[in-house]
Image (cartoon, rainbow, N blue to C red):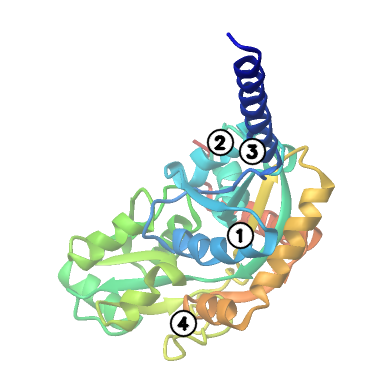
Amino acid sequence: MSLRRTVVSRALRGMAVLAAGLAVSAAMAQPKPLRILVGFPPGGGTDAIARTLSERLADALGVAVVVDNRPGAGGQIAAQVLKASPPDGTTVFLTHDHTISILPLVVKNPGYQPDHDFVPVGGFATFVNAFAVSGGTPATGFGDYVQWVRTQGGGKGAVGIPAPASTPEFLVKVVGEKFQLDLVSAPYRGAAPMMADMLGNQISAGVGSVQDFMENHKAGKLRVVAVLGTKRQAAMPQVPTFDELGLKGFEDLPYYGFYAPDGTSQKFITQFSVALAKVVAEPEVRHHLTAMGLTVGFMTPQQLATREHAYTEAWRRIIKTSGFVPQ
């Protein structure tokens, strides 16, 4: 091989090595995508919220954001995935009260302990649960539903719920006792399949979050006939509260928030919290979430932790009074 060819060959190899090194450096410098775990299937209210926030969070954080649905057991599976995830700022869990406050009270071994395994990184909304009837029932109000169950089913009826041992299940029990009905909870794997059966008139009623029912309520495909809380919802002001109907004890509002694995750095927690505050302050985002039935309000990690603990203690008393035995 001539001297010239040797020099050229070595130069080309050197350039290849340099290019490979630059590619590796660029890959290492590229931040990893942020994964948002969702414990319910696509098409439900929580999934819709996650997808509303993910794009804006990507802009605010400067990283790609992906929604990872891990449905099953009322969010329990996603929570276990979060626990097993490295605390490196690449995974957060968007969830509500059921997974964080209720499941640990009603399941003997959920596979996680929120206070030990998770750290709150920011909250963004509260909401209320609602009682809805399918389009196949003649009821236009809650009183109509009660009368319909008494006349059509001899006082017996099945009510869909998004998950077993959930706030909706306890509500079904309390509603039945209050209005002297024999109501049985029919658990589903999330709000989306429950909604499908309601729209197909396979089940006459269901309990879930307002955001689960909102779109079909507005379209007249089903009817929300009562909501929890002490105030009517701005998105459906004609619907009375259970408080108005004489059912007390459900004044504490459930919440939505983000959690990260325990051990996640304070730097990431602060960055995410600041980004979330920025996103939920955007008028378009607030309008979209409000239209879904949420009461939007940013919560710092500490404020989310305070709300979570207060809600958990309120439901600890309700569950104990009900006589429910953890399964």
Labels 2 and 4: the sequence-earlier one: 2
Which secondary structure, mark 3? Answer: helix
Other residues around mark 1 within 10 Å, as few (<14) / some (14–19) / many (≥20): some
At x 42% / y 45%, what residue is drawn? 71
Q: Which residue is mark 4?
A: 245
Asked where in the image residue 253 lies, by quadrant, the reply is: bottom right
Q: For the residues carrying marks 2 and 3, which lies nearer the camera in this image?
A: 3
Q: Mark 2 Cα within 10 Å, few/some/many (few <14, many 20+)?
A: some
Q: Which residue is mark 2?
A: 81
Quarter the N terminus occupies: top right
Residue at the spot of label 3: 27
Please state which of residues 259 and 204 is positioned toward the viewer in this rendering: 259
Q: Name above or below for residue 131 compared with residue 26.
A: below
Pointers 1 and 4 in contact (CB under 8 A)? no
Residue type highlighted by circle 4: Leu
Numbered mark located on residue 58 in the image = 1
Q: Is residue 160 left or right of residue 303?
A: left
Q: Which of pointers 2 and 1 indicates the residue nearer the eye?
A: 1
Q: Are marks 2 and 1 in contact (CB under 8 Å)?
A: no
Name the residue rendered at 28%, 82% in the picture.
Answer: 219
How far separated are the C-alphas under marks 1 and 4? 43 Å
The residue under the point 73% across, 54% down is: 121
* Quadrant of res 89: top right
